[in-house]
Amino acid sequence: MDKARVLVVDDESKYRNLIKETLEKEGYDVSLASDGEEALSMARSVNPGLIICDMKMPKMDGFGLLKSLRQEAKLDTPFIMLTAVDDFENIQNAYEFEANFYITKPVVWSKLFESTRLLDNIRVLLGVSRTDKA
């Protein structure tokens, strides 16, 4: 089975790298982008199987990226919003823009990051069981 490609979008390198490390240990092929504009360009060229995106970023935020992706029929890529913003209006907006999941980053992010929820959501979206690797 080919490795599933995941595009991780976050303006903070520590978060991008932590998520990348977590996903690569699970066998995923990970690409990184630091803002929505870069991610949109990459999504068009590398055709990821999944996008994990922060909400607040420079140039184009996560909502702008999600709206742009959904406007392009060929880019109906599964999308997880992973953000520190935890309020009803933003969660509702993410789902209205057709995000598949909205996950709130923990206040203290470390190597002990609760990756289980993120990995379980990825498996659901990519159709991979717990015992399978990407």
Image: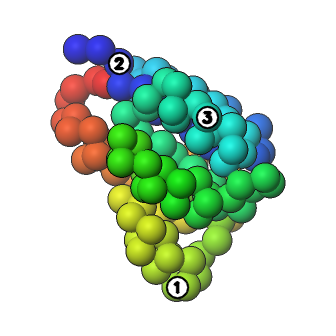
Q: Which numbered marker is on residue 21? A: none
Between the C-alphas of marks 3 and 1, the distance is 30 Å
Comes first in the chain, label 2 or label 1: 2
Q: Quick one: 90 or 96, which is closer to the camera?
A: 96
Residue type marked 1: Phe
Q: Is residue 52 visible?
A: yes
Between the C-alphas of marks 3 and 2, the distance is 21 Å
Q: Residue at x 37, y 34 (%)?
A: 49
Element class at badge 2: loop
Residue 119: x and y in percent read: 39, 43
**Quarter containing the C terminus:** top left
Q: Which numbered marker is on residue 3? A: 2
Q: Do tag 2 and tag 1 residues touch (Cβ < 8 Å)?
A: no
**Quarter containing the N terminus:** top left
Q: Badge 3, how many Cα within 10 Å: few under 14, some, many 20+?
A: few
Residue type marked 2: Lys
Between the C-alphas of marks 2 and 1, the distance is 35 Å
Residue denoted by label 1: 88
3 over 16 or under it: above or below: above
Left or right position of 58 against 90: right
Q: Badge 1, how many Cα within 10 Å: few under 14, some, many 20+?
A: few
Q: Which residue is situated farthest in the bottom direction here?
A: 88
